[in-house]
Image (cartoon, coloured by chain):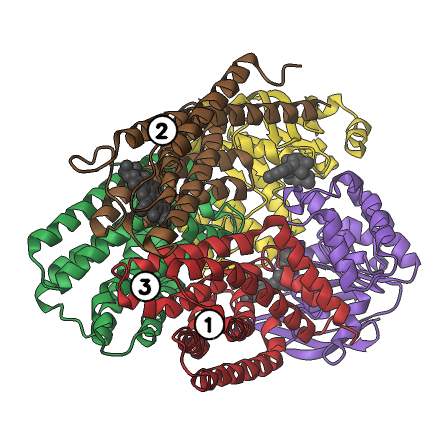
Chain colours: A red, B green, C purple, D yellow, E brown
Amino acid sequence: MNSLQQIYTILHKDILLELRSKDIITTMLIFSLTVVVIFNFVFEPGSEEMATSAPGILWVAFAFASNLGLSRSFAREQENSNMQGLLLCPVDRSAVFTAKVAGNVLFIFLVELITLPVMVLFFDLHIGPVWLPLLGTLILGTLGFATVGTVFSAISANTRSREVMLPIMLFPVTVPIILAAIKSTSYLLAGRDMSQVWSWLRLLIAFDVIYFVVCFLLYEYVVEE
Amino acid sequence: MNSLQQIYTILHKDILLELRSKDIITTMLIFSLTVVVIFNFVFEPGSEEMATSAPGILWVAFAFASNLGLSRSFAREQENSNMQGLLLCPVDRSAVFTAKVAGNVLFIFLVELITLPVMVLFFDLHIGPVWLPLLGTLILGTLGFATVGTVFSAISANTRSREVMLPIMLFPVTVPIILAAIKSTSYLLAGRDMSQVWSWLRLLIAFDVIYFVVCFLLYEYVVEE
Amino acid sequence: MIRAQKIGKSFGPLRALSDVNFEISQGELIALLGANGAGKTTLIRILAALTRPSTGTAEVAGYELNREQQQVRKRIGVVSHQTLLYGEMSAQENLYFYGRMFRVPDLQSRIDELLGLMELKKRRHDLVRTFSRGMQQRLSLARAVLHQPNVLLLDEPFTGLDIHAEELLTRFIEKAVADQVTVLMTVHDLDYARDHAQRLLVLHKGRLAIDAAAAQTTRAQIVELIRE
Amino acid sequence: MIRAQKIGKSFGPLRALSDVNFEISQGELIALLGANGAGKTTLIRILAALTRPSTGTAEVAGYELNREQQQVRKRIGVVSHQTLLYGEMSAQENLYFYGRMFRVPDLQSRIDELLGLMELKKRRHDLVRTFSRGMQQRLSLARAVLHQPNVLLLDEPFTGLDIHAEELLTRFIEKAVADQVTVLMTVHDLDYARDHAQRLLVLHKGRLAIDAAAAQTTRAQIVELIRE
Amino acid sequence: MNSIRSSHLVLIILTFIVIEIALYLSFLYAPTESTMGDVQRIFYFHVPSAWASFLAFFIVCAASIAFLRTGKAHWDRLAASSAEIGVLFITIVLLTGPLWAKPVWNVYWTWDARLTTSLVLWLIYIAYLMVRNYTTDPERGARFAAVFGIIGFIDVPIVYMSIRWWRTLHPAPVIAGGEGSGLAPEMFRTLMFNLFAFSILFITLLVLSYRISTLEKQLQALKHQS
Ligand code: HEM
Ligand SMILES: Nc1ncnc2c1ncn2[C@@H]1O[C@H](COP(=O)(O)OP(=O)(O)OP(=O)(O)O)[C@@H](O)[C@H]1O
Ligand SMILES: Nc1ncnc2c1ncn2[C@@H]1O[C@H](COP(=O)(O)OP(=O)(O)OP(=O)(O)O)[C@@H](O)[C@H]1O
Ligand SMILES: [Mg+2]
Ligand SMILES: [Mg+2]
């Protein structure tokens, strides 16, 4: 495909900017730790609730962190109307979309990978036997979140007075993803039957595919003025 | 006081901008509602856990929503370097601070007032007899949060990755406020003795006063270049 | 190389452009003039495919603007009111990024050449956000011409440039025109436009009021249009 | 009205200004010249109390910059590279806000006067973000002079203005100077500076290279400094 | 070239001696604790590290106030050095704690008051370091960090008290713990000496780190001139 190189170029630029500032990753990392600490005050220590709500806290932390990461990633294209600069380049909108999704998935997933072990320690989780399906859930959840988030952050970045749009759209629309991810994570951690987990995972995959196709098709309308 | 009129002018401008775009209030509202909804799914509905953790969820939702509102409120002063425009005006930094805190408290409190009834429904809370002290807790918690948040949002606006720096600074530092607010809310809802509640409320007042004085004194170092 | 047909643009109730028609052939240097708010930027943005016209069509560099955007984009270089540069990347990195996006062959030497031309070589590794206004404008010019476009759309390209850079840019444009590049640029300096441009387009409240060679219009005519 | 003593400013390793000394008395119109990156904006920002100098002190409008900022602020009007306007408020609302902040007496009629002067009256209720570049610059000028400052610090005030607005501004400045307002402005147009300013300050790589009346320097001298 | 001043050399040697003694006391002199066994010896590093970090954060606050009042850059450098070392020590607490917790509580972590507090403190001072590094203009970064350092330090006692009222599981204070804190005299003496030793270690690290940042600044200045 002839735009592969351009996808790579955009991705490379985003990684370069990230390596330069280490903004997104470090801050998301610390942020998700902070979220975990804050959420702890919701519960009495050592209580049952705490153990059962670990998957919820985990995903809410990831969702918040991703939201911030996404808005940062698009804010970068805004400073000097850089998105217009991208639009001046002879590149398909779909290539821009793919590159942006790839970058966002990469950053968010990295953060999750680093945060997860810390969470495992903090909540005394036993992920030994289920680490593989857990990783799958993580990737699937991230993919869905980043896909929708990429489109929405483009909308919210492009249309001025609708700056609010990212969280307004992102959270309600991704509630299904977050829920499916929470459910399968908690089933996995509770050692439930794989078939039960699988029903949620299937849902997650379905959401991912639908969102990706729809977003891919809609993206070009979103980035243009 | 001769800067009272200027405080009012700044506040009036912020309210005008908000009325025009409604972005701060809508964002915060949607966000806190989403948090409540997600948590609703984390627990089995109608369970014991749900009732005991309601105050925690309430405050965590408010804290995260406020964080978003605070960062937007400062982003507005940034678009065309408007903060520099404010600094060119012959007005004490402390007046700018007071106006900004007032605006933030106003917006956050409004959102809380709208969210609260929803929470009451969702979590089946009984606030009839304690609504007055509950409102007091709400105001006190908001005040402390907005005070610290106003200083930190001015700082974070001048850092790289500003969206993320705000919560990273804000949440750890406001842990005492969040904690005291959760405690008094849950004592109130559990129908505990007013003297027990009062000991936490007193603490909250003490925090508010300390933070306000310190932030008031430090603000001038933050806004100047 | 550029043909605009009945171009109109409304922003809500406000008509920024109405019924604009003109043609520019290859190797022409055209100045787009007009009062503040006359619609110059809007027109340039439409020709650069950054905004869709409300009505009308245009052809740029031999391709239809609506249907063959990619082909158009490959062949145009745009300088706009914003710099379109990444503040947190260095001058060199910005050019490298755009160069790759345009698949510029032999990119590094092209970058060296342009940084040399704009006299930014010493600052090539500094972050763009630390640049002064004029330095950013210079880099923005370098960015626009990186891929050797056939058509240059320049919106107030002299903004913030010192007199030395102004001369450099003038010489650059002259050379480009000699190489058969088509240039459409907005300027406020009437005398500059009259001295350098082969033809003047003057917008007046969104309509094309004058389309003539410099020699065929008087300065007073244009001034009057700008004064309203 | 302005006295700069040994002003220096470093950005990390980069020295943007070193040892700048000058004095400007009341009612003078001074042009600040220099190549891109020479330090003009940095100097203006220091005098406007928007940035602290790394070394040195300054006195503006009779007050010490560091100690009596409020007094200084009341008396200066600043136009900078940014417009400092709120995009989501109308022209009228922007001026009203700044007017109240400066406690401008009889504000409404002052706003009317300035909107008339800048010929923005028709657009007074439109949001500023929909303004064209030149219209924003006009409004930014109105904002800067709203409170009838004694000292004007203008950083490239002509940017984006059409020739008509340019004349308006020139006349406005001349009138202000006749009323004993002190004006320090940066421009790139040498001829304009030589024709209008009583004295020229030329920065060269952060140092004050020339401080002389226009008649006492040749154009060539300045051009050479700008060419490096 | 006196890259190491003699006063520094004295400090370094003193620290070395004191730490050697501390090691001896902790591993050989102090008796093995009856229920927890040898793990308990972590205690002698765990507690002094916590103490050293509190000291460090106090210095951050004091130096920040001094910096804002005087605008002298050396106060800022002192605050920055102290914060870095403080974060180092609180990190040691956060590492030794779980190491100790696993054998005795059978989990690495629990959301107990003292543990949560330590984590919150760690987060606050990580944020402090980030504010400094993430601000684009170094002069402002110093000012921001100072402001944050002051507000953050108000939190140190508050966080401590408030969370203690909230929940607790971690051992009660031994030093001012009143009756029955049940520490053998040898243990108590060892702890006391280690507190002293870590204070010396902290001071040495601070002095050296401060010296390094001064030298760095001079190097920068030299680079300007050339
Ligand atoms: C898991 C992580 C842990 C953390 C973050 C932690 C943190 C701290 C901190 C900050 C202090 C100093 C507090 C003060 O002086 O007020 C402290 C003291 C102490 N810790 Fe821990 N601790 C941890 C685990 C443990 C464990 C597992 C034990 C033993 C069962 C333990 C025993 C002690 C004792 C005996 C003191 C001295 C108490 C005093 O003198 O106040 N800690 N710890
Ligand atoms: N996004 C927008 N929304 C509403 N109106 C707009 C928008 N952009 C431009 N306009 C209006 O369209 C008209 C033309 O604007 P344009 O920017 O094209 O003018 P211009 O000729 O470039 O002026 P200048 O010389 O000041 O740059 C103006 O009246 C302007 O207010
Ligand atoms: N925030 C900053 N960080 C680092 N360097 C800066 C910063 N601001 C300005 N500089 C540098 O200081 C020097 C002077 O910049 P300044 O903006 O004052 O130039 P200028 O004379 O206004 O130029 P122009 O004519 O292009 O507007 C330049 O080399 C610029 O790169
Ligand atoms: Mg324009
Ligand atoms: Mg400048």
Residue at image x 18%, y 59%? B185
Type of amino acid under label 1: Leu
Kindly tell me whether residue B76 is visible in this rendering.
Answer: no
Q: Closer to the camera, B18 or B69? A: B69
Q: Position of residue D181 (x, y in %)?
A: 52, 30
Is residue E182 rendered to the left or right of residue B192?
right
- As drawn, the label of residue E195 is 2
The response on whether ligand 1 sits within 8 Å of label 3 is no
Q: Is mark 1 within 8 Å of ligand 2?
A: no
Mark 1 — residue?
A: A170
- Compared with A161, D114 (above or below) is above
Q: Is residue C134 left or right of residue E169?
A: right
Chain letter of mark 3 equals: B
How packed is label 3: few (under 14 Cα within 10 Å), some, or many (20 or more)?
many
User: At which x and y percent is residue C204?
Assistant: 66, 64
Image marks 2 and 3: residues in contact by CB distance under 8 Å: no
Residue that badge 3 annotates = B61
Q: Quadrant of ligand 2?
A: bottom right
What is the spatial separation of the Cα atoms under label 2 and label 3, in whole angstroms? 42 Å
Do tags 3 and 1 sit on the same chain?
no
| SS category of the residue bearing label 3 | helix
Q: Is residue B110 above or below residue E143?
A: below
Give the amino acid at mark 3: Ala
Q: Residue at x 21, y 75 (%)?
A: B121
Instruction: Please give left or right for residue C30 compared with residue D121 in the image.
Output: right
> Which SS class for mark 1?
helix
Q: Is mark 2 within 8 Å of ligand 1?
A: no
CA gap, disc 3 and disc 1: 16 Å
Q: Locate residue C61, reporting x and y percent.
A: 83, 71
